[in-house]
Image (cartoon, rainbow, N blue to C red):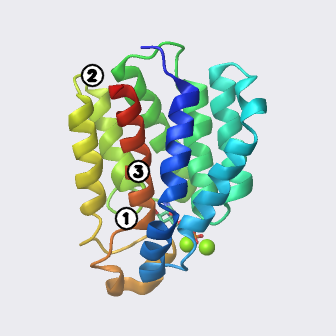
């Protein structure tokens, strides 16, 4: 399929920006109350630089988004989401199949695990990105099933104990709250599903 990259990015940006308060509230429970602010700053910068980003071919455009996120989001999530977009830019072929999307996302997950020294089950964004990548890689994922999996996976971080990131400082007190990065990943994946559904 041809990816409508600009529409995808506009929709992801708009959803993240309008969820800033919710993401910050989640981070206030188990972190330092800035995840929504960080992500909003990053995607506002992406929007401000759209002309420069979309003057490039698709792979380079995604890498440029990643660089902007690294520079503007800050915190733990900036380099991680930056790595995600940069890897997608490197790995996605021009007209990706669903399985290609899965492979590229899986490569991003591998890069992110290395970058954050984290794994699935540590109560992070990886707990949404990892299962969704694996599901897409099977090649038979429907949009509806991807959306449901993203939502279910973000919810599944609630009973987890954080092993990585700031929330891990809380130990057992991190249990009972949704991970903010898992929620922002869910929002992005849902936005992509909504655009691709048309
Ligand atoms: P900070 O924690 O530096 O304030 P943010 O609040 O923007 O950064 O982002 C926090 C989110 O980043 C967490 O909810 C978690 O999903 C993710 N995160 C933190 N550390 C890691 C890590 N080592 N690996 C993967 N994700 C991480
Ligand atoms: Mg934070
Ligand atoms: Mg912070």
Labelled disc at residue 11 = none
> In whole angstroms, how far apart are the C-alphas of marks 1 and 3?
19 Å
Which class describes the residues within 10 Å of circle 2: few (<14), some (14-19), or many (20+)? some
Rendered position, 83 above or below 126: above
> In whole angstroms, how far apart are the C-alphas of marks 2 and 3?
22 Å
Callouts 1 and 2 close, C-beta under 8 Å: no
Placement of the C terminus among the 4 image quadrants: top left
The spot of residue 79 in percent (x, y) is 63, 54
Quadrant observed for ligand 2 in the rendered image: bottom right
The spot of residue 8 in percent (x, y) is 51, 33
Q: Label 2, on which residue?
A: 139
Mark 3, ligand 1, within 8 Å: the answer is no
Among numbered discs 1 and 3, the one appearing first in the sequence? 1
Labelled disc at residue 187 = 3
Of residues 90 and 147, the one nearer the viewer is 147
Mark 1, ligand 1, within 8 Å: the answer is yes
Residue 156 picture quarter: bottom left
Q: Label 1, on which residue?
A: 122
The spot of residue 96 in percent (x, y) is 44, 17
> Horizontal placement of 102 versus 17: left or right?
left
Rendered position, 152 above or below 158: above
Residue 197 picture quarter: top left
Which one is in front in this view, the residue at disc 1 or the one at disc 3? 3
Q: Please report the residue visible at 55 percent of the width from the left and 80 percent of the height from the top.
A: 32
């Amino acid at each position: 399929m041809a990816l409508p990259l600009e529409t995808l990015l506009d929709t992801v940006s708009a959803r993240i920006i309008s969820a800033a308060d919710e993401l910050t509230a989640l981070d206030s429970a188990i972190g330092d109350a800035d995840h929504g602010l960080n992500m909003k700053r990053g995607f506002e910068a992406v929007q401000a630089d759209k002309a420069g980003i979309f003057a490039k071919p698709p792979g380079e455009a995604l890498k440029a988004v990643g660089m902007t996120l690294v520079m503007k989001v800050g915190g733990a999530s900036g380099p991680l989401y930056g790595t995600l977009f940069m890897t997608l830019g490197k790995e996605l072929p021009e007209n990706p199949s669903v399985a290609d999307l899965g492979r590229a996302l899986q490569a991003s997950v591998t890069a992110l695990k290395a970058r954050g020294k984290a794994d699935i089950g540590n109560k992070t964004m990886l707990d949404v990105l990892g299962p969704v990548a694996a599901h897409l890689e099977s090649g038979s994922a429907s949009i509806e099933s991807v959306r449901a999996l993203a939502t279910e996976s973000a919810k599944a971080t609630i009973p987890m104990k954080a092993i990585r990131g700031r929330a891990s400082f809380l130990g057992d007190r991190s249990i009972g709250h949704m991970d903010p990065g898992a929620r922002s990943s869910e929002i992005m994946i849902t936005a992509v599903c909504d655009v691709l559904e048309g």
